[in-house]
Every structure is written in structure tokens, then in C-alpha cells.
Amino acid sequence: MTISLLFGVHAHQPVGNFPAVIDDAHIRSYGMFLRVMERYPEFRFSVHFSGWLLDVLFERFPDDMARLAAMTRRGQVEWFGSGDCEPVLAAIPHRDRVTQITTLSDKIERRFGMRPSGAWLTERVWESSVVTSLVATGIRYVAVDDYHFLCAGEDQDRLDSFFSTDEDGRRLDLFPISEAARYRLPFSPAGEAVAWLEDLARQGRRAAIYFDDIEKFGIWPETYAWVYEKGWLTQFVEGVLASKLIRTETYADYHAREKTRGIVYLPTTSYIEMNEWTLPAPRAATYHALLEQEKAAGRFEAHKPFLRGGIWRNFMSRYTEANWMHKRMLGASRRLAALPPEQRTPELQEYLHRAQANDAYWHGLFGGLYLPHLRRAIWNNLLMLEAALERLAPWPRLQQGDLDHDGHVETALRNPFIHAYVRDDGHASLVEFSSLTVAHNFGDTLRAYAEAYHAKIDQAHAAHATQDAGEGITSAHDRVAFLHTILPGDADPDERPRGIFVDNLVGSNDMLRPLDFYAAGDLPGSWIATGEGWRIGKTYRLDDDALSVVFRAEGKALPKLIETELNLALPSCDGYGGRYVLADGSVPGGFGDALELAGMQRITLDDSELRGALLIETSQPVRLEAQPHRTVSQSEAGFEKIMQAVCITLAWSPATGLDQIITLRVIPAS
């Protein structure tokens, strides 16, 4: 008896990723993979490329895209669809799922002559609500992890073919991706992988179902040499084709000739590693320890379906920045949907689709919430959409409500140039300061969070030194490395938000006290804090491309100093394009440098990547201290420190009746 090998690969790069990174991915993975597979027309397989990546590859590597089109025409390749810009479908409205899926299906049909019947689910995030959207766009089947099925109570021995589910009367078929295959290909020697498939055939298994990231074939650490220079992919393909027990087949052909295994209803879940990443640090550590305990006791495989962890949406509760970005995106989606059909242009739809790209909304070993350039791409597209909507259907100039459902009211201040949001959480600081002129959110920073993997830092060097890979190579899930030197304290979490205008008081004893008890004032955009013998008012106002904050102190027992902290996200971060410029035109340093100034009233943050600059002016002289704000995160390449923002602290001595006015003015490049 033969076994059908359903072999699928998924290719994606985040919207906004650096061109050099995409080029490297193609050179070391996508292009190499296609050139090997082109030599074996009888090896049939399935592919999914996100639509945004396809557009880039057609522009930059047209020859390889022509190669892929030829492989499609000869019947070797089946195309899978999904959302065009790789959203987590469960995290966006039905209307946007439909436009995202349809956009990519149209693109694939136009360029490759095939309309997908199958779809890839981003990060294999399953919620039953996506069924109706997928079916409405012509999708008949999707691939998710076998773990999803185990969590539904299915027997592992039955997970060798597809099942069916339904929602609101719509049927969708589900293929269980083999975790055992994901961990073998391409990490175990090719001969062993082929022998494993043959053994499955002897056991009477119908199909070996594989669908995983193509980046494992060349981009993951050590894989380029393993897969191509040492010939793993060629050996595997030739071994499969030479076997009398294995036949390659597309998902479409297998689906057309086989019957469903039966009905199944999957719980809301993703792959098991993701379910750990979604948990807050203490819970993630407890969960990880539980998994290790079960593995050590030999009970893990039996108990795995019942050790479920969290769900993908937990990232919105874990990271306030992800939640804010997500809710702002949903608001823009509603505004776009409310336009008359003739005004909902493809360009506006594309802005929304790009703002829904999944990568910047979450973080684990993968995911890009910690990467400023990926968050910036979300905001850039969202703000270009909002700039267009500002001309078609402007927001109210002043609006209040709990936009992100966190229990705190946000006050929105808007004009045609600036959108600013103040959260009424005691800090009265800006959670967003966005310029529609340059399509940039200066409030797009990330506070330092406690992460479960920070516990590895002290032991990582020793663990890395004692790793013994043996035959094969080490998966990124098990690899520990450092991209930067991480010192004690580098990973300490922030105790307060990283907003703009986060205030402190300095008393006569030089003790620092957080000013985190502001209450809303009588006037829109105003907040009041009071203490024994003093009162401080804080009022925001907009004027074209400028935002000003007026601090008014009154009383007989004023603090020695008022400090306000501005965490300003700028594209260059600590790159070469960001620099401070003083009033006399001199440049005291870059954004990655520490800076101290006394008696300052004017400084410009000049950024070549911003296509403009940010001018800070004060009505009264202030002491300025600036330093980079960095976070410690982990990726598949290792631990790294990433600059999130310029942290500027302004301090002055308050006096009754003498207002301090701090103005942030956006200056577009001429």
C-alpha cells in the first residue's frame, strides 16, 4: 500500500520588511527551493505565498516567478489562498476577510491561471467564525495542525486524511498537518525522513500531511548549508520519487478522490508553541514547567491535548500597544465600510489590508511586535488610509470613549493634520500622536515587558555551549543564541507606560514621585492634579501641524521640579539617519546617544527616514536629558536589544502664574 505525501510550503514576509531581508530570503530560500523542485516535475506539491510578498517577488525576481508559473501550468504546483496581506482572519471583520481572501485569489488566478480551492490559515489560528468567510470566497479546505484535532478529542491514528466542519450551514474540510512531519522536515537526515514516510505506508496510513514555512528551507539558522549545500532537499525529493511506497499528490487531487473522515468541531487554538507565547510571563513559565514535567514523566504525548495554554487573541490583553493598534485598525475598517461604494477605491482597500498584516500584532519566537519597522508599516498604512478618510468623511474633532475596551476613556483630539489620543488613566499622557502629513505615529513605542524567556538569559551561554546537535540540525525552537550583549537590568520591565508626556514631581528632598493621579478637568483636553498646597493643570491643544501642552502650576507649596517624559518613536532609531539639531544648527549626537542640555528651549529631531522632522519648543527654559529606550526580545536568531524610542525628559521649576508650554511641531521635508 502506498501513502500520499501532501507536501505544502508557505512563504511570507511581513508588510514593511526591509528589502534586503526579502532579497536574502529569496536568494537563500524561495529561489533555491524553486530551482531544485523545477528539476523534478513528477514531485507534486502545494504552495502559499502571501499576496504582498508575491507583489514584491514579481517586481524583484520575475524570472523565478516565471519558473513558478511554468510549474503551475504543468500541474506540478497547487496554489493555496488566504488573506492577501496575511492577516489573522479571526482578528478582522467578516467583510475584510472576504476582501482579503478574494484579493489574493484574484491575484493568483491572474498571474498563475489557477484559482485556489485551499487556504493557509495564518499562524494556524483557528476560530470557527472564519468558516463562513472562507466558504463565501470559494475556499473548500484548509490545513491546520493535528494538535487542533487532538484538542477536539480525535485519535492520532485517524489523522491521516481530511475531516469536515460547518458553521451557519456552510461546510469546510480540514486537513490535519502532521507535527511529526513538521519536526522532521528538513531537520532530520533525508534518508531517515523517507524511511519514516515508508514506515507510515506500511502501517496503512492514507496520507502524510505536511504544510510549513518555506523559510525552514534556507533561512532558519544552519538550514541553507544543510538543505542546499549538503543536498538535503535533492536527496529527499529523489528518495521520495524512488520509493515504491510513497506518491506525491496535491491537496486538490487528494481532496477530489477521497471522502471525508467525518465531522469535527475544533476548539479555538493555534499550534502548541503559540499557545505558550500568548500567556503572560508568570503563567507562561508555569505552563512551560508543566510541559517539561509531563515530558520528563513520559506523559506528554498522552496529555498534550489537555495542556492547551492560551489563545492568539491573548496578545491583545498582554500588550496594550498591540490592542491599541488593533482597535484603531478596526475603527478605520468601519469608517471605510461606511463610505459609499464608489468611494471605496482599491487604493484605500489596500491601505486597510496592509494595516491588518498579522506580524506586528504579536510576539513569540516569531512575530514582530518588538520590531519598530513592522509596527511602523502598520501605522503608516493606517494613517494614509485615515488621511484619505479625513478628506471624504472626517472624524469628529473632539471625541471621547473607551476605544480599546480597557476601562479607561480616551480623549481624541483631531484636525486635518494631527490625531492625538489622551488616556484618562491617571497619567493623562498621549497614547498616540500621529501626523497625517508624514503618516507617522510618534507614540508608536513599546514598553519593556517581563517575558518568560528572560529567565534563559543567565543560563543561555552555558546551555548554548553544551548543545550537541548530533546528526541533523537544531530547530529554531531549541536554539539559544545572542545577537547582542545582554547585561543585568537590560530586561527589567517598565513600571509605567511609555507614553508622551508622562509626568513626575521632584520634591525639596529630591525624591521623585510619579504624577499619576490626574483627573479630567472641566474643559475638553484638560486634566488636573492636586496635592497639599498645590495644583497642576495640564491641557492639550492642536494648531495645524503642532500639538501643545500647557502646564499651569498654582499654590504655596509647589514641587521643586516638574518632569515630563516624552517617548518618541522615530524611524531611524539608533541608525545613521536620526540626529538631534540644536537651535544654533549644531548636532550634539544621534538618537542612540545620551544627551544632556541645560536651559534648552528648542531642539529638532531630524530623521531622514521620516521625510521630515519633529521640533520641540518650550516657553520657559528646561533641563533636557535624552537616552535611547531599548527592549530585550528573542527571535529565531537569538536574544537582541532593540531601540524602541527616544526617551526625552524635560524638567523645570514651576512658578504660580507662569505657564510652561511645550510644543511638538511636525515639519515635513521640503
Image (cartoon, rainbow, N blue to C red):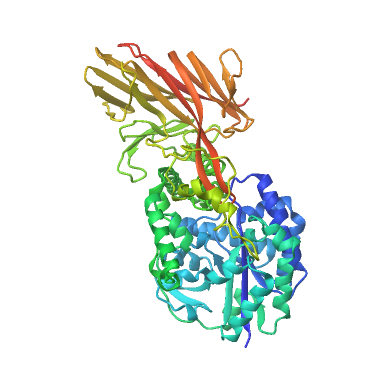
Instruction: Say if 594 sits above or below 411 in the image.
Output: above
Quadrant containing the C terminus in the rendered view:
top right
List x then y, in percent, for residue 628: 52, 30
Residue at figure coordinates x 55%, y 21% from the top left: 604
User: Can residue 307 be seen from the camera position used here?
Assistant: yes
* 120, above or below 559, in the image: below
Q: Is residue 118 above or below residue 608?
A: below
Q: Nearer the viewer, residue 115 or 67?
A: 67
Residue at the image point whose x is 40% and y is 43% from the top: 320
Residue 265 in which image quadrant: bottom left
Please state the horizontal and vertical placement of residue 391, each as a whole percent of the image.
Answer: 49, 37
- Residue drawn at (53%, 49%) of the image: 460
The front one of 63 and 280 is: 280
Quadrant of the image occupied by residue 79: bottom right
Location of residue 563 by image quarter: top left
**In the drawing, does residue 74 fall left or right of residue 115?**
right
Residue 266 can be seen in this image:
no
Judged from this view, the residue extending furthest toward the left is: 532
User: What quarter of the picture does the N terminus occupy?
Assistant: bottom right
Which residue lies most toward the bottom here?
A: 1
Measured from the top left, where is residue 15 in percent x and y? 58, 48
Instruction: Give residue 183's position: percent from left, percent from top.
Output: 57, 67
What residue is rendered at 51% in x and 19% in y? 596
